[in-house]
Each structure stands twice: as C-alpha cells, then as structure tokens.
Amino acid sequence: MKDVILHIEHLSKTLGRREILHDISFDTYAGEVFGFLGPNGAGKTTTIKIAAGLLTLDEGEISIAGHDMRTQFEAAMAQVGGIVENPEFYKYLSGLENLRLYAAMRDGVTEERIREVVHLVGLDNRIRDKVGKYSLGMRQRLGVAQAILHRPRLLILDEPTNGLDPAGIKELRDILKSLAHNEGIGVMVSSHLMSEMELMCDRVGVIVRGQLQSVHPIDELIAATTPDRAEFLLRVNDPARATGLLSFLPEGALKMGEDGTLDLVLPMAGCDAALAKVNRALIMGGVSLYTVSKKENRKLEDVFIELTGEGGGQIA
C-alpha cells in the first residue's frame, strides 16, 4: 500500500464573505506526481498555499507525512519543499553559493547533499556560474534543487512551467518525474498546460469554483469521460459517389470535409461491424478506399474543458 504524504480532509477556506474552498478531500502519495487542475480562480493556488503553510485553514484537517498541521506545524513543514511563486536568488552569487546559504538555515544539509541535488537537477556544469547568467529554466531547476535540499517527503510546485520554452518544460518534467518515481518524493504540481500535465502526472484532481470535481489516474479519467462514439477519416477517390453509396447511414453520421475527406461517426457499440459494412459498400460500389484512420483519442485538455465548463472558475 502506498504511503500517504499529503492528506486533506474536508478543507474549507473563506476570505471575507467569499467561500474560496468548500469541503475538499484528497490524498497524494509517495512516488507519484499529482496534478492539481482548475480554471483561473478555481482555488488551486489557495489550496497549495494552505498545504505549504502559507495560509491558515478555516475548517478541515491537513497532515503531511503523518504530521497534523494544526498541532504539529513545524514537524509537518519540515517535510515540505516548494516553489509557490517564482524562485528568488541572489543574482550576484553563484548557484552553489545560493544553495549553501539556504543549507545553512536547515539542519543536516551537507556538502555531499548539495552536490547530490545539483546532479539531480542537471546543473553540474553551471552551478558555479552567477545566477544572473542563468536562463529561466536553469533558475527553475535551481529552485527545485533548493526545495529538496532538506530531503522533504512532499514537493509542491505552483505553475512551475510558466515562461519556460519547450526544452525547459521537458527538462523540468523529466526532473519531477524522476524525483517522484526514483527518489520516492510525493510531487504536487499545478499547471495550465494540459498536454504537459498529461505527460507528467500519474493522477490528477480537478477543482472548479472551490469544489473538487474528481480525482483519478490520468488514463482512467480520460477513459471515464470518453464519448460513446468513434470518429474516422476516410480518404477515397470519389467523395461524392462514396456519399451516395453510404446513404444507409443515419443522418449526420457522414460529412464531407473541405479537403475531400469523409468524416464518419459510428457508435462504439458494434463499431467494427459497422465500419466493415462501410468498407464493403464502398469497394463494391467501385470507389477506391485509400485510407481509414481513427481520429486522435481524447486528451486531458478535452476532459478538463468538459469537467470545468465555460467560465468554470470565478473565485480569485
């Protein structure tokens, strides 16, 4: 059974007269990357700030590696590393000097540990350069190194890929997956980049208007919301004739695209048999069928839009 690193139960938060979070409950585990998704203002950052000890909780319970945040705050926070805003460093110092300054504020962080985290985030060749010469991606990696210096059980990152180019995003994604899967750290990350979250995360939670909508492994979430239809693209030599030959299909099942391809929609139930019937009708009618390709499977972005709806987050 997986170790629960972050346990949140019936969490609620009110600012003034506005309820920011309402009765949120979920767990994150050691060795996984947990994605926290939601529209702007849905409550992601508020939840993350509470878990990182930057905001107080009004109602509910939070424990980190078994330490209750209300009664064992210091012990709980000792298990957390994070980047909630952009990481800040002394730009006139080297990356190594910055890490040594931070290490001096933590018990038990040795030079060996500093070298270890530098290697984990891939900064071996640049760690002695001044931070002012670092790219944004390098500063993000240095921020991760700083966050894990004290060997936290939980790493929390709020929008860590903001401003990064594709290469920087991939580098950070690989680092976070390695920290979770190889080092056993529980990683909780929020992002607006659905394609990256799909590649990075093992499970995701979706929050809308301060309420948690679902928590599922990525594959299960996409599968659970997959429609009961399959879409195919057909390339033929005579689209007009093919349309006539397939007049037996239900209304709306077949459409001709601007490029002459045919867009075919079939029910998932009996899909193979129906597709075989279509193929047979075309070939027997003298139409050359060049290719049949299934349209791209649904992605996390499709599921996110479906779950959140238009204007899903209204709370700041």
Image (cartoon, helix red, strand yellow):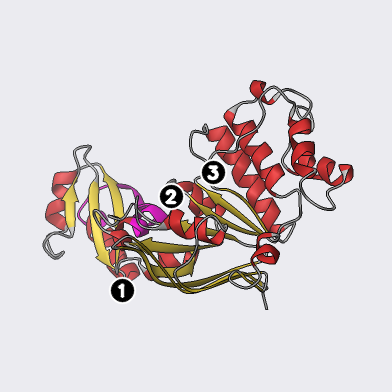
| Magenta-tinted stretch | 283-304
Q: What amino acid type should be assigned to the residue bearing mark 3?
A: Pro
Residue shown at 47%/48% (left/top)? 191
Instruction: Please say if the residues under marks 3 and 1 sit with CB atoms less than 8 Å apart.
Output: no
Residue at the spot of label 2 = 194
Instruction: Please tell me whether residue 291 belongs to the stretch shown in magenta.
Output: yes
Whether 308 is drawn above or below 10: the answer is above
Q: Quadrant of the N terminus?
A: bottom right
Which residue is found at the position 68% from the left and 37% from the top?
Answer: 142
Question: Left or right of 30: which side holds 263?
Answer: left
Q: What residue is pinned by disc 3? A: 160
Comes first in the chain, label 2 or label 3: 3
Does residue 113 appear in the picture of this structure? yes
Q: Is the C-beta separation of discs 1 and 2 under 8 Å? A: no
Q: Neighbour class for label 3 at 10 Å: few (<14), some, many (≥20)?
A: many
Q: Residue 270 has which mark?
A: 1
Residue 295 vs 96, above or below: the answer is: below
Q: Marks 1 and 2, Cα distance to the nearest angstrom? A: 32 Å
